[in-house]
Image (spheres, rainbow, N blue to C red):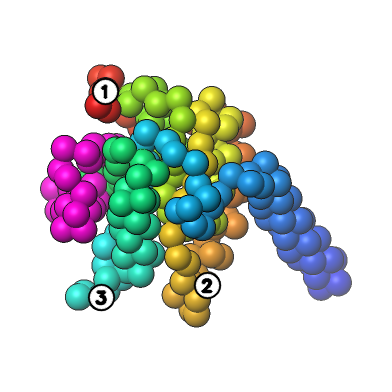
Amino acid sequence: MKKRIRQILLLTILGTTLLLLLCTSVIEIATIGKTYTATASIPHNRVGLLLGTTRYQAPNKVNPFYANRIQAAIALYQAGKIDFLLVSGDNATLYYNEPNTIKKDLISGGIPAEKIFLDFAGFRTLDSMVRAKYVFGLDEVTVISQEFHNERAIFLAKVKGLDAIGYNAEGISGMGGLQVYAREYLARVKVFIDLALNTQPRFYGKRIVIE
């Protein structure tokens, strides 16, 4: 009986590992050549889509993923590689508003307020990409996040009919980064579950023109 349980456990672990690797490989292969690390080499797109995350890791400790995304967006705008920024993030409660927080930091970095548009219903990456196309009317976009996140976003965009490239914000090493990267494997499996179930954004809403 114990031997049988060990065999089942081993097969479960092996199957899960293969599933994680398969989903990751499909996304990485589909997005080869779609992400950039230098402003000099990335093509111009009218709109950059900055994917939100929480500003703080702990009280009074800024999340480095957040800080690096802000810096990447500012660098891309200052290099003339985007004309507008669409900030997509979570606005689930009165006390948690990613888009407004990000907008304040972008303005502090020198980006004019009138060049920044906010998507308050970017609860998930899927929502952000689908809403960029169907609510904000974009046919092409430059996604701004860390490379692993950009790859997943670009893959979703491609499936949903949105032409996307990515500008990679600096990543994070060490234990803090390891936890995020580990969760990414699960998020990539969830991509295919959502596609199979035809999962839709939580909200659509009225069309918003970026100009």
Indicate left or right for 201 with 198 as reference. left
Query: Helix or strand or loop: what does disc 2 sit on?
Result: helix
Where is residue 153? Give x, y as percent: 50, 43
Nearer the N terminus, badge 3 or badge 1? 3
Badge count: 3
- The quadrant of the image that shows the C terminus is top left
Query: Helix or strand or loop: what does disc 3 sit on?
Result: strand
Is residue 47 depicted above or below 101 in this figure?
Answer: above
Report the residue marked by disc 1.
209
The foreground one among 116 and 131 is 116
Q: Quadrant of residue 209?
A: top left
Report the residue marked by disc 2.
178
Residue range highlighted in magenta: 93-122
Tell me how far mark 3 sits from mark 1, CA to CA.
Answer: 36 Å
Report the residue marked by disc 3.
61
Name which residue lies at 51% across and 36% down: 164
Name which residue lies at 33% across and 26% down: 136
- Viewer can see residue 204: no
Q: Residues within 10 Å of mark 3 (few under 14, many from 20)?
A: few
Nearer the N terminus, badge 2 or badge 3? 3
CB atoms at circles 1 and 2 under 8 Å apart?
no
Residue that sits furthest to the top in the current view:
206
Q: Amino acid at mark 3?
A: Lys
Where is residue 102? Give x, y as percent: 23, 53
Name which residue lies at 31% across and 51% down: 78
Nearer the N terminus, badge 1 or badge 2? 2
Is residue 108 rendered magenta in the image?
yes
Q: Amino acid at mark 1?
A: Val
Query: Helix or strand or loop: what does disc 1 sit on?
Result: loop
Residue that sits furthest to the bottom in the current view:
174
Tell me how far mark 1 sits from mark 2, CA to CA.
Answer: 38 Å
Indicate left or right for 106 with 79 as reference. left
